[in-house]
Image (spheres, coloured by chain):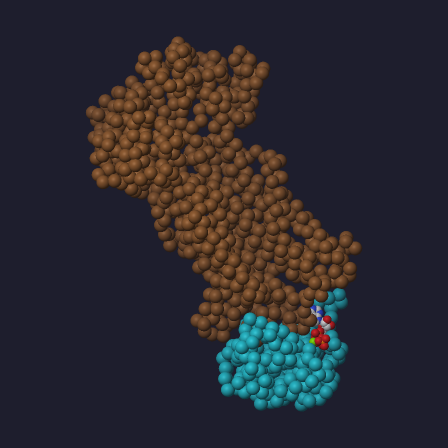
Chain colours: A cyan, B brown
Amino acid sequence: MLLNVRNVSKSFPGEPPVEVLKGVSLDLRAGESLALTGESGSGKSTLLHIIGGLESADAGSVTLDGVELSGMKDADLADVRRRHIGVVFQQFNLIPSLNVHDNLIFHARLAGRQDNAWTNHMAGALGLTEMLRRYPEQLSGGQQQRVAIARALAGKPKLMLADEPTGNLDEDTGDRVMELMLALTAEAGTGLLMVTHSPARAGALDSQITLSHGRLS
Amino acid sequence: MHRAAFLALLSHWRRQPLQLIALLFGLAAATALWTGVQAINQEARSSYDAAASALGQGTEQRLTGEGPIPRETFIALRRAGWLVSPVVEGQVNGVTLLGVDPFTLPPMAASPNLQGDRLGAFLNNGLILANADTAPALAGYNVETAANIPDAQATMDVTTAWEVLGKTGFDYLVVTSPQPMGLPPLTEVAPGLTQVTEEAAGDIANLTRSFHLNLTAFGLLSFAVGLFIVHAAIGLAFEQRRSMFRTLRALGLPARNLTLLLAGETAVFALLAGALGVVLGYGVASMLLPGVAGTLRGLYGASVPGSLTLDLSWVLSGFAITFAGASVAAASSLWRVATLPILAPARPRAWAMASVRGRLLQAGAGALLLVISAVIIAQGEGLVAGFAMLGALLFGAALMLPFFLDLSLRAAAFVVRGVLGQWVVADTRQQVPGMSLALMALLLALAANIGVGTMVSSFRATFTGWLDQRLASELYLTAQTPAQAAALEALLDAEADATLPLRTAQARLVGAPAAILGVVDHVTYQQGWPLIEAAPDPWARMNAGEGAFINEQLWRRTGLAMGDRLELLPGWSLPIVGVYTDYGNPEGQAMVAQPELLARVPDLSPLRYAARVAPERVEDLRKAAEALGVPAGNILDQASVKRFSLDVFERTFLVTGALNVLTLGVAAIAILASLTTLASMRLPQLAPVWAMGLTRARLARLELLRAALFAALTFLFALPLGLAVAWMLLSVVNVQAFGWKLPMLAFPVEWLRLLALALLAALLAAALPAWRLGRMAPSRLLKVFADER
Ligand SMILES: Nc1ncnc2c1ncn2[C@@H]1O[C@H](COP(=O)(O)OP(=O)(O)OP(=O)(O)O)[C@@H](O)[C@H]1O
Ligand SMILES: [Mg+2]
């Protein structure tokens, strides 16, 4: 099993506190893809952040490839992110000061797993070859998201977390980006957990679950 | 509508308290340093004026005798046509009492203001005039206050002085200059009297000019540095409120009114900061003033009270300068708001992303200013040109700084390996526009530090070496009366290895007051007075009475060349055969053979002597001289003269050191202000890197590194700039202001110390933003990916 999530709860401070996750559990096998759907504000992003070690859970455990993440020190969590997890968010994934090429290889180099052939292959497949010298601000939203996907996969991580990666794109562009992402994830042998609002997109993945009122169904 | 709009505009500051603090503090600091320095200058200047308007301005010619001068002698001199005025001098309770004769006192020495009744009281009722600080010391006498009397002095009629001091006769007679032509010689009219030159402080205002110039330049610089902070804070606040401006405009607020509201906001801030700045300025001034006063007293004998008098005009000028500064700093932002299209996109990052073209234009303007500065060097003359040149140089270099930083970071990108290193360099490069104003402030502070530091150190090194040479004699003695002098000379002739009588005559050389030094032929002079320009065989010719030396000041001012004839006294001229350095003296001076001088000015007082004597016999000789009645204070050995001179030198530049630290501190605040205001804008740069596996703590450390990198690069640029400033100060401004040129020396250890200080300042400034980043809630970083911005 690549990913085990057991009884994860999380609430945010407030009056009264917002109980976002109330004991969520899920599993993901290596190389498989899972869609996470749910209403706006249901806690999808929060769950994704906890799995990615970006935020901590109040209770419960997250195990990635047999390694328990909950209770880890900040530095160790960062190490896990660096070496095993790729992330793509809705927007602003790219480092503004680096050009497309440097963005592409950034994460893989951080992880110490740069593979030029694989990066070039992805850049070609995603149609980025012509824009390697450009800067993020000179790209359209769809182009930016394609760069983010390629970057997340460049180090062939064990797990890819995607939070509405096509949420800001128009239908056609979104479809194309989504297809490419699924194909490349499969090619890299990376497990995928993706948040989406679109039932159609969710249907394209191996399986899907829905979060509502803090629980999965 | 306007009230609501104004409150909406102000709400920004509630959410950005640090930015508000930076703005207010920057403005207040700028005001404080400027007004503080002004207060000191003003205080000093008014006490110089007071001193100058009292008895005897500058060097004074006096007639003295053995003991009190009888009234009859004075009357005889007046009858013979001599313009002299009697003075009775004495001490009471630590106050110097001067009894004067208001009718014959020379007109240039503005006598106490004696209008109407006061004159009568002065002449008949024993009225004593002293300033408010001094008057209490004379309680019991008929004292009235007069602001123009210097500290620790009191003026009265000679008859009053006689009564108070229990004396008769006059202590000396002031000789008015010029005297009428064809006077009978002194030896005929008053055989017992000798004419002496009272080597007083000279023209104090003139002497202290270097000092005040220094202070003013620093005040101006600090003000400019403070304005950089304010400009950055205001510019950023406007940029961040762009979307609010858009909304207000869309809701029907005309651009003109919006601009007026913002100008009003700036005015409110200026009022607050002005009040704070004036208070702080008073604090700065009172903190520095005792030191300044001590220095001025030791260095120039100028009396400046150690406490401040606060006047309204000073407070008002403080506010005026705050308003002027705030207007300058806000002008460009206001102009942009006034011309802002309603639908301008809200792009906070646009502020940080100055176009390449803009940056090149700015660098071009900077280069142009450097060229202008060079042209002024080649063409300009005078002190104003000197400062214009310095201003153009500093401002031009500041404008070029972003270009230089960008260039060096671009170069660094080729050298740095490793993915993080490359990112840091690229990210630092992107931060250049946002940081450039603060870094310009740092640049100015560093360049001023290097420039002034190099000047002071060069001066110190040169001055020390020069003192060592110049103060070659082991003992310096001043007799009180000609009779004592004769005994002293006999003693020295018998006991010392060499007696060097010092004789100085006042004269006008090339149209300006100057001194003529008559020296005897002794090897001491050849060793102690290095010539910076000389004709062949200069010493032999000077000693033979065939030539004269002049000091550097006179040489530079007049442009005289070797062999040109210099008229020393009417009917006596000599060719110039050498030029010697004479630091610290504002006046021209010539050196001639003593016999030649005495032959033409026989009345010269023979009171001062230098003696060459083996070191182990110095004490014996001192005791022997004291036995003759020469006061101990009039016998100085070489070491104490040197120590005294160096002490005075160090104290002079103590204030410079304090101001150096203050300007650096202000620059550090500028960096802090920029970093804290930029911090929120930087999240989009940092969040992706964090998400990809760098801890916040590591990112925070990298932020510190980045600040250090900026400081180091700025220092690199500041070093040649500071040396250029030092060169200009030493070889242009000093020459114009004081008439001497100093060799420029390099002090690499000081540079390293300054680099360390700059790094420390940058690290301190970056510490708070970095600490906040290190502890930032992950949700704030995650917001970057979800926010619609
Ligand atoms: N830092 C925070 N502080 C307080 N409440 C928060 C915070 N982050 C999220 N929440 C709240 O937690 C709940 C879940 O938020 P989350 O972003 O996980 O929802 P989501 O399912 O991703 O929604 P969407 O589909 O709109 O992205 C929301 O009610 C949100 O207001
Ligand atoms: Mg979400």
User: Left or right of B635: which side holds B450?
Assistant: right
* Closer to the camera in the image, B188 or B239: B188
Q: Residue B611 placed where, x, y %?
A: 26, 30
For residue B525, what is the image quadrant? top left
Figure check: B131 above or below B615: above
Q: Residue at x 58, y 64 (%)?
A: B354
Within the image, what quadrant is residue B341 found in? bottom right
Q: Quadrant of residue B145?
A: top right
Q: Is residue B127 above or below residue B522?
A: above
Left or right for B143, reference B746: right
> Is residue B600 at least partly visible in the picture?
yes
Q: Position of residue B652 (x, y in %)?
A: 43, 40
Q: Is residue B688 visible?
A: no
The image shows residue B420, relative to residue B262, as above or below, that is below
- x then y, percent, for residue A209: 71, 85
**Picture quarter with the N terminus of chain B:** bottom right
Residue extending farthest right = B1
Q: Nearer the viewer, residue B105 or B510?
A: B510
